[in-house]
Amino acid sequence: METAAFLLSQLGAHASSQFLARAAELDLTGPHVGVLRAIADDPGTSQQALAQRLDILPSRVVAFVDDLEDRGLVRRERHPSDRRSHALRLTPTGEQVREQLRVLGAEHNDRLLAPLSERERVTLTELLAKVAAAQGLRPGVHPGFRHLGR
Amino acid sequence: METAAFLLSQLGAHASSQFLARAAELDLTGPHVGVLRAIADDPGTSQQALAQRLDILPSRVVAFVDDLEDRGLVRRERHPSDRRSHALRLTPTGEQVREQLRVLGAEHNDRLLAPLSERERVTLTELLAKVAAAQGLRPGVHPGFRHLGR
DNA sequence: TATTGTTATACTCTATAACTATA
DNA sequence: TATAGTTATAGAGTATAACAATA
């Protein structure tokens, strides 16, 4: 029998690639989705704050926000008091895409849990949440695009 | 509340990076571990068979087996009937490392499941195994080093 | 002097395709 | 002609470090 840790690693990679295949239809990669979501959750945030929260390099945030801005999903607004930093917000189109991603995520979840009963789904979700909390994983922050250097 | 799918993706990435940090102490990356394990599970197998089973490119298998051979963990033997192919086997040192990896995996699993009761661990493992089976994931084959091209 | 954002560059991992030796 | 293994090369994603503007 495989360990739960290996099954988690296996299923996590599988779930990620399945979801990202759907996100790719919207021309979004994993980090793009993470950044979009982080901006939606904290409108007006700065690129530095984003880099810290998602644990990715500021130089990468630049590129991702560039992409999202080019696609008309995100705006760089002038920060009211500090002219060095930008206040990031979703555009109306960005909000729409955010909603599409939410639907996509729900569909993906349903497909993945298809073999489980309603009761089993709840149990699984609770156990996963308990382990995730104990490991210090923060809601919405995917460790996959964390930078590992010093 | 996060979906089980996102929690899986999150926890899977976390579990992988935790385990690979330990494996890195033995100078092994994820693919190295996968190849080592696949050879242990099917001694005498060929590089082509390995590439098919793990769903990685034959050209990558060459590099991984090169590395493992340089470190004295794997041998390329002459195939008895087909001189084009190699029969791959673990060396005694390779067997030792394989055992170290097993211990490492068990420790890793214990650490990850620390917040759960014995009963909860069994439940979680069973639910994960059920979902993994339904998704067509094969035991020991990590989708993380699967090649995604045509 | 420190910080935000940016750019340029190097590094790592992976994919593609051409090659050799055997079959 | 097809297959096993190999090599060389190109591409994607990431990290590092230097820079300009502002604080």
Image (cartoon, coloured by chain):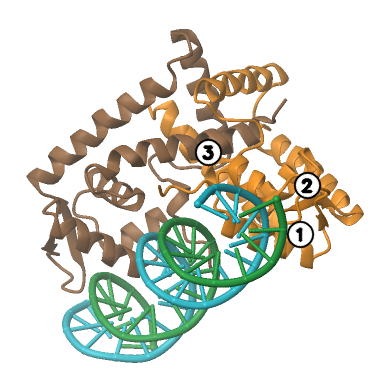
Chain colours: A brown, B orange, C green, D cyan
Where B49 sits versus B131, above or below? Answer: below
Gap between marks 2 and 3, in whole Å?
Answer: 20 Å
Q: Residue at x 49, y 42 (%)?
A: A137
Task: Give whichever of B59, A80 is nearer the camera.
Answer: B59
Residue A107 x %, y %: 31, 24
Q: Nearer the viewer, mark 2 or mark 3?
A: 2
The reply, left or right, for residue B124 in relation to residue B40 is left
Disc 3 target residue: B11
Q: Chain of mark 1?
A: B
Q: Residue at x 54, y 39 (%)?
A: B12
Tell me whether circle 1 and circle 3 mark residues in contact (CB < 8 Å): no
Task: Give whichever of A19, A102 is nearer the camera.
Answer: A19
Element under label 2? helix
Q: Residues within 10 Å of mark 1 (few under 14, many from 20)?
A: few
Tell me whether circle 2 and circle 3 mark residues in contact (CB < 8 Å): no
Tell me whether circle 2 and circle 1 mark residues in contact (CB < 8 Å): yes
Element under label 3? helix
* Amino acid marked by disc 3: Leu
Q: Residues within 10 Å of mark 2 (few under 14, many from 20)?
A: many
* Amino acid marked by disc 1: Leu
Disc 2 target residue: B101
Which label belongs to residue B26?
A: 1
Task: Give whichever of B63, C8 is nearer the camera.
Answer: B63
* Amino acid marked by disc 2: Leu
